[in-house]
Image (cartoon, rainbow, N blue to C red):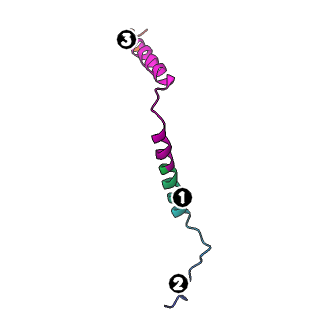
Amino acid sequence: MNMDSEEVDENSIDAEALQAQIDLSMSFAQSLVSSWLEPQEFPASSRNRDLEKDLTEYMKRPPR
């Protein structure tokens, strides 16, 4: 096997492959940790409902 024409630099880093591996590992870690936790309803969701209700009421008002 002649490696002269295709000399491989073992110290070179493929940034895209590295980032893909990091993303995959982080996704796995997030999935694992979220499987340990019970889903919780956040207080912001009730606030969002209040804002939506206020917006609906505002849209029903006649134009000035």
Indicate which disc residue 6 carries. 2
Local packing at callout 1 (Cα closer than 10 Å; few below 14, some 14-19, many 20+) is few
The disc labelled 2 sits on which kind of residue?
Answer: Glu
Determine the residue positioned at 53% across, 87% down. 5
Q: What secondary structure is the magenta-colored segment mainly?
A: helix
Q: CA distance from mark 3 to mark 2?
A: 71 Å
Q: Is residue 36 magenta?
A: yes
Local packing at callout 3 (Cα closer than 10 Å; few below 14, some 14-19, many 20+) is few
Which residue lies most toward the front here?
36
Indicate whether 17 appears above or below 35: below
The disc labelled 1 sits on which kind of residue?
Answer: Gln
Q: Nearer the viewer, mark 3 or mark 2?
A: 2
Indicate which disc residue 60 carries. 3
Indicate whether 63 appears above or below 45: above
Secondary element type, mark 2: loop
The disc labelled 3 sits on which kind of residue?
Answer: Lys
Q: Position of residue 34 (x, y in %)?
A: 48, 40
Question: Sequence-wise, which precedes: disc 3 or disc 2?
Answer: 2
Question: Sequence-wise, which precedes: disc 3 or disc 1?
Answer: 1
**Quadrant where the C terminus is found in the figure:** top left
Q: CA distance from mark 3 to mark 1?
A: 50 Å
Secondary element type, mark 3: helix
Q: Position of residue 61 (x, y in %)?
A: 39, 9
Secondary element type, mark 1: helix
Part of the protein shown in magenta: 29-58
Q: Nearer the viewer, mark 3 or mark 1?
A: 1
Give left or right: position of 52 versus 15.
left
Residue assigned mark 1: 19
Give left or right: position of 58 versus 23.
left
